[in-house]
Amino acid sequence: MYNCAVRFGELDSSWPLKTLILSPDIDDAKEDVSMEDAQEALAHTAGIVLNYLIDQNIPHNILIADEGMTLYIIPRKFDLLIENVQFFTSFETLCGFIKFKNEQAYQNHSYEQ
């Protein structure tokens, strides 16, 4: 189908989040692989993985790095399952930003919380 393999990996166990890494295997390619072929193979593989997560009802975040040639897929919990928390559990939160669910929660927050 594609003449470029896609590598699957996982961040080491010292990382606090389970993260799946996808990237085209350009270095070990036996044939001359164009960037277009590598991108198509990566996009197709990512589509399969993401469709599986969606079918299994698993929320996730996607980080794109290396000019689109590396994808980090981070499964997470649903925001609705965490009732006592007034902020979202999305990529912004992983980066240290807090995005509140409503104006009242923002007005009532304190740094101690």
Image (tube, rainbow, N blue to C red):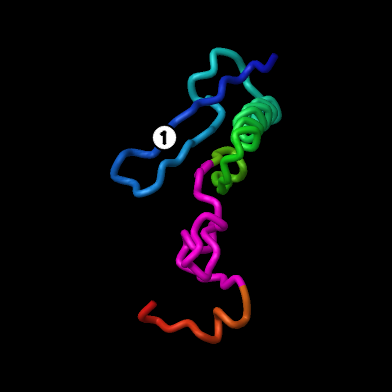
Q: Is residue 93 magenta?
A: yes
Query: What residue span does the magenta drawing correspond to?
Result: 72-101
Q: Secondary structure at mark 1?
A: strand
Is residue 76 a member of the stretch shown in magenta?
Answer: yes
Q: Give the residue at x 49% y 36%.
A: 21
* Residue furthest to the left: 14
Give percent across and percent down for residue 77.
Answer: 50, 50
Q: Residues within 10 Å of mark 1 (few under 14, many from 20)?
A: some
Whether residue 15 is situated above or below residue 32 in the rendered picture: below
- Name which residue type carries label 1: Glu
**Residue found at x 59% / y 14%:** 31
Residue bearing mark 1: 10
List x then y, in percent, for residue 85.
48, 67
72 or 54: nearer the viewer: 54
Residue at the farthest bottom position: 107
Q: Nearer the viewer, residue 81 or 19?
A: 81
**Quadrant including the N terminus:** top right
